[in-house]
Image: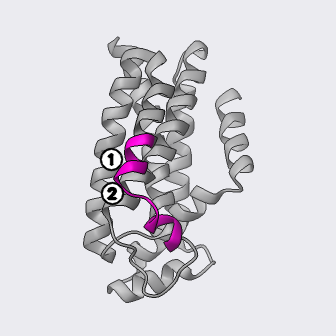
């Protein structure tokens, strides 16, 4: 039950903030055919089929990856997943334009992230994960790749990022970290 409890605690602590971004992004990118329609769908607070499927896949994947870990590795995986997932939004916010026209709630925050913030945030994240050795290195490399791929995809689909896409990237990176940790315990 520990992996399930850890996932529930994370959702409760954040109010499902990042999961909501994942759900909205999945609905918009899955249901819209034009950039404008995708962004319009993402603003709709209702959960559609794509959102439900994305949430089930990501939460289920997180649970299965965490449940496959030896109990002694669970803390490290959770630590790496949460730190690197939160870090992943920095390079995306710094490198990509905000996709919505006008003044959106998250735009001032995204506009305030530049190379200095990315460098400081990256150094801080590195210091937080470094004590976990090789699994941390593998998770960090995988996180960077997933964040970059997410950025390329969001730019192609929407012309940039939104708060929802940052939440989706966060969730993808967190899942990736858990999968890397599950695999690393077998490789190392």
Residue 110 vs residue 155: left or right? right
Q: Main secondary structure of the magenta part?
A: helix
Is residue 58 in view from this perspective? yes
Which quadrant of the structure image shows residue 56?
A: bottom right
Closer to us: 140 or 184: 140
Vertical placement of residue 33 versus 165, above or below: below
Residue 117 lies in the magenta-colored region: yes
Quarter that holds the N terminus: top right
Closer to us: 47 or 34: 34
Please tell me whether mark 1 sits on a helix, a strand or a loop.
Answer: helix
Disc number at residue 146?
Answer: 1
Q: Position of residue 139 (x, y in %)?
A: 38, 31
Closer to us: 118 or 183: 118
Q: Is there a contact, CB below 8 Å, between mark 2 and mark 1?
A: yes
Q: Which residue is mark 2?
A: 150
Pointer 1: residues within 10 angstroms few (<14), some, or many (20+)?
some
């Amino acid at each position: 039950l520990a992996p399930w409890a850890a996932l529930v605690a994370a959702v409760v602590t954040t109010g499902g903030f990042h999961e909501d971004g994942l759900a909205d992004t999945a609905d918009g990118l899955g249901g819209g055919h034009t950039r404008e329609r995708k962004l319009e769908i993402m603003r709709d607070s209702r959960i559609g089929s794509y959102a439900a499927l994305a949430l089930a896949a990501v939460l289920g994947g997180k649970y299965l990856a965490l449940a496959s870990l030896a109990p002694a590795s669970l803390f490290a995986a959770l630590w790496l997943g949460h730190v690197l997932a939160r870090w992943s939004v920095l390079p995306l916010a710094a490198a990509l334009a905000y996709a919505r026209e006008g003044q959106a709630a998250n735009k001032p925050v995204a506009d305030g992230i530049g190379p200095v913030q990315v460098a400081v945030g990256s150094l801080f994240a590195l210091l937080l994960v470094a004590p976990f050795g090789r699994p941390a290195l593998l998770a960090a490399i995988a996180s960077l790749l997933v964040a970059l791929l997410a950025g390329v995809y969001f730019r192609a689909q929407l012309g940039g990022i939104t708060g929802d896409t940052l939440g989706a990237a966060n969730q993808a990176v967190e899942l990736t970290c858990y999968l890397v940790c599950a695999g690393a315990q077998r490789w190392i």
